[in-house]
Image (spheres, rainbow, N blue to C red):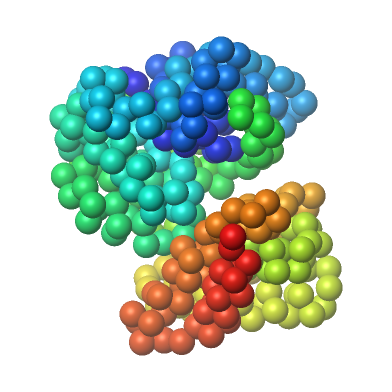
Amino acid sequence: MKINIVGGGAIGLSLAARLSRSGIAVRLWTRTESQAQIITEHGISLHGADGGISVHRVEAVCSERLLGQSELAGSAPGDWVMLTVKQTHLADGQTIRLIGQLADSGGGAALGVLCLQNGIGHMERLRDALPNVAFVQGITNEGGLRIDERTVAYTGHGELHMGPGADAEGQKMFVKALRKAGITAFVSKDILTHVYRKLVVNAVVNPLTALYGVRNGELPNDPIRLALMRAVYAETLAVLVAAGMKESGSEWERVLDVCRHTANNLSSMRRDVEEGRITEVAAINGGVAALAERLGKSAPLNTALAVMIGALDR
């Protein structure tokens, strides 16, 4: 089995390094030739949560090189793709074309594609674009921070959940490979609940830290910010429960726990705003607002956050 990882961000680099360390065949697909070249020459430098640093050699290829050159794909039945790019990178079509060529070279639906995007709406877009590919929805709450093109800090252990795939035996082998690499992976029959639980956190923490310009741990420390957090949380939870999410009763505590456990972190949305990148607010708060509309409900706070953060996108 070979695991193709599409995306050289924090999650992609961390997964590639850890899988390679455990002896799994990995190929990392990057958006730029410069990142592919530096990783090929020097490997991925993984900074562990314990302070240790290790370097792991990984085959890296710029995704643009594959387009029109299907012989580079080299996929086979039983191989898997881990799609780790942000939802914003799906819009230009390059990633979708790459997945299509990988699937064609691997026998179409024989190639499982695990999608690890934040927010909602992307699965429908991917399945509409490539109806013969076996896309599997997934979510991970592991922490990572990309320091440069080849260096990633592993900032917190978490879990990876995925829905059932078309090839049950192949998926068992895939999960076994992930666990061998120290990645706590599960196949869930209720993947939407896992997706929605993360969406509750992201819909509160990401836009509000970006809007107020604070670190995650600072967000609840002001009574006005805390009141707005509660209001966005309540609205988001109501929409997602109506959409089928199973309540555990601990969702609000989970929001606060994330703020505490990642107290010194800058949320990805705040970093995107400060560094002039397009944010994922359309897939997160915009996704909640769109889901509410389909259900005949209103989500004015999520709609407002999508508009306000969207105005900061450059």
Quadrant housing residue 63: top left
Judge from the rendering whether residue 149 lies leftward or rightward of residue 63; answer left or right. Answer: right
The quarter of the picture where the C terminus appears is bottom right
Judge from the rendering whether residue 130 lies leftward or rightward of residue 217; answer left or right. Answer: left
Would you place residue 137 above or below residue 304 in this image? Answer: above
The residue at 21%/42% (across/down) is 133
Give whichever of 144, 8 is nearer the camera: 8
- Total labels drawn: 0
Would you place residue 102 above or below residue 198 in this image? Answer: above
Quadrant housing residue 66: top left
The residue at 46%/41% (across/down) is 84
The image shows residue 287 at horizontal and vertical percentages of 44, 69
The residue at 36%/42% (across/down) is 95
The image shows residue 108 at horizontal and vertical percentages of 17, 35
The residue at 79%/80% (across/down) is 224
The quarter of the picture where the N terminus appears is top left
The image shows residue 122 at horizontal and vertical percentages of 36, 57
> Is residue 53 visible to the viewer in this orientation of the structure?
yes
Give whichever of 80, 156 is nearer the camera: 80
> Is residue 5 visible to the viewer in this orientation of the structure?
no
Would you place residue 288 above or below residue 92 in this image? Answer: below
The image shows residue 261 at horizontal and vertical percentages of 73, 50
Would you place residue 312 above or below residue 132 in this image? Answer: below
Quadrant housing residue 278: bottom right
Give whichever of 9, 157 is nearer the camera: 9
Judge from the rendering whether residue 266 lies leftward or rightward of residue 288; answer left or right. Answer: right
